[in-house]
Image (cartoon, coloured by chain):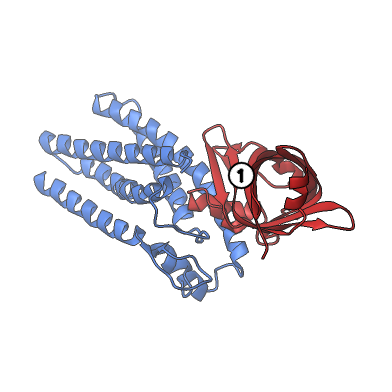
Chain colours: A red, B blue
Amino acid sequence: MLFFSILFSTDYQVENSKVTYYGDHYLHKWEGSTGDIRGDVQYDENKKQYNCSVVIPISTFSSGNDSRDSNMLIYCKAFDFPNITFESKSIQVNTNTLDIEGTIEFAGKRKEFKTVAQLKTLEDDQFSIEGEFGIMLSEFDIERPSLLFVKMEDLVLIKYSIQGVQNE
Amino acid sequence: MLDLTLTSFKKWIFFLTVGLFISVSYSNPSKAFPENMPLHTKILWGESGVLRKIKLAPETRKKELQLRVKMLQLHQKIALGSLTTFAYQSYLGKQLVDGNYENYDLHSKMSKVVWSTYMVSAGLSYFAPPGMKYSKKLSSMKIHRLLSWVHFAGMASIPWLGYNISTKTSIGERDNAINLHQNVAYATLFTMSFSALLSFLPY
């Protein structure tokens, strides 16, 4: 725990990270990724609490299908709400995992959510975590696109791999 | 007959060459519009595109993309209807070739339905506003777009090839005209079906 305390007593900038969504339709499954993830992890001395904030521009997701990526911007209301943001409320550090609770803002809607992240790397000047969680598009009032008269699944799996590098 | 086949073939090759040429992506240095738009999209929707000149383009890119989504959704649905009708139409055509003329009128009437729905569907796709990006990588949608020139050429020539059958007086010429009409129809049906299958692939 002492080691964790040392790690999180400094500020980290998010770098070399990746977020991937997994879409599902009865005709096919697909995924879209982005590496354009900005954010930081800080330690609040007053609250004795770790804070994390992450911002992802929706337009940076690429699924390998330009037409789908273009259409996604409309369905996800990216012209009005261009970013997906995450703000942590609490980060509980365990031996090999982090219990993260926070708020995700997507398409103009804010939702509370929880995820358990696996701690993959822990060094003096950097760390990396990985994890996944699911979101329901309907909870964000997102109209689901359809193919052959059938809409895609409401549940979208999100996988993340976040790397933090200590600020100089 | 050889002349007719050769002329049709030359027309087909010319159309396909022009089609493939204008389907190739062209770079556009403007930041407001995507790079590598297909030429026909650039002509219609580029910075100085025809639809902007005549003030038919929506005011914002957001509205353009909303229109694009609607047009492509409708394109997908009408194309599916057109393909299904075309498959049945091909079955009726085969019956005529085999000597069963019971459905001659139906084949004739349905040709108008197939052709009209196909052209509406094609129009919805060709005239749709540009997406946000056009990568140079080969994808199922890129092949889908390139194949469209093949089945468009086929669909454009099928009515004329059908009419051509009725102008033949000798049995030999008539058989050749029927074969040409049938082969072009089958090639068109095959490329349309393949094109539809491509749109169901994830990449």
Q: In this view, does B144 lie above or below B101?
A: below
Visible residue check, residue A86: yes
Percent position of residue B75, x then y: 50, 48
Task: Give the residue drawn at x 61%, y 44%.
Answer: A145
Along the viewing direction, whichever of B12 and A143 lies nearer the viewer: A143
Q: Where is residue B178 in the image (x, y as percent from the top left)?
A: 21, 36
Tag 1, which chain? Answer: A
Residue A104 visible (yes or no): no
User: How many discs appear?
Assistant: 1
Please say if B10 is above or below B26: above
Q: Where is residue B10 in the image (x, y as percent from the top left)?
A: 18, 53
Q: Which element type, helix, strand or loop, lies under badge 1?
A: loop
Question: Is residue B171 depicted above or below B55 in this figure?
Answer: above
Q: What residue type is labelled 1?
A: Pro
Nearer to us in this view, B13 or B30: B30
Determine which quarter of the picture holds residue A1.
Answer: top right
Position of residue A166 in the picture relative to residue A139 (left or right): left
What is the x, y in percent for residue A71? 57, 52
In the picture, the quarter occupied by the N terminus of chain B is: top left
Q: Mark 1: few, some, or many residues within 10 Å (few <14, many ≥20)?
A: some
Q: Residue at x 33, y 51 (%)?
A: B149
Residue sitting at x 43%, y 35%: B85
User: Left or right of B189: which side holds A42?
Assistant: right
In the image, what residue occupies the spot 41% across and 45% down?
Answer: B140
Q: In this view, does B53 lie to the left or right of B184?
A: right
Comparing B56 with B17, the one in front is: B17
Q: Which residue lies furthest to the front in this view?
A: A2
Query: Would you name the residue on which mark 1 appears?
Result: A145
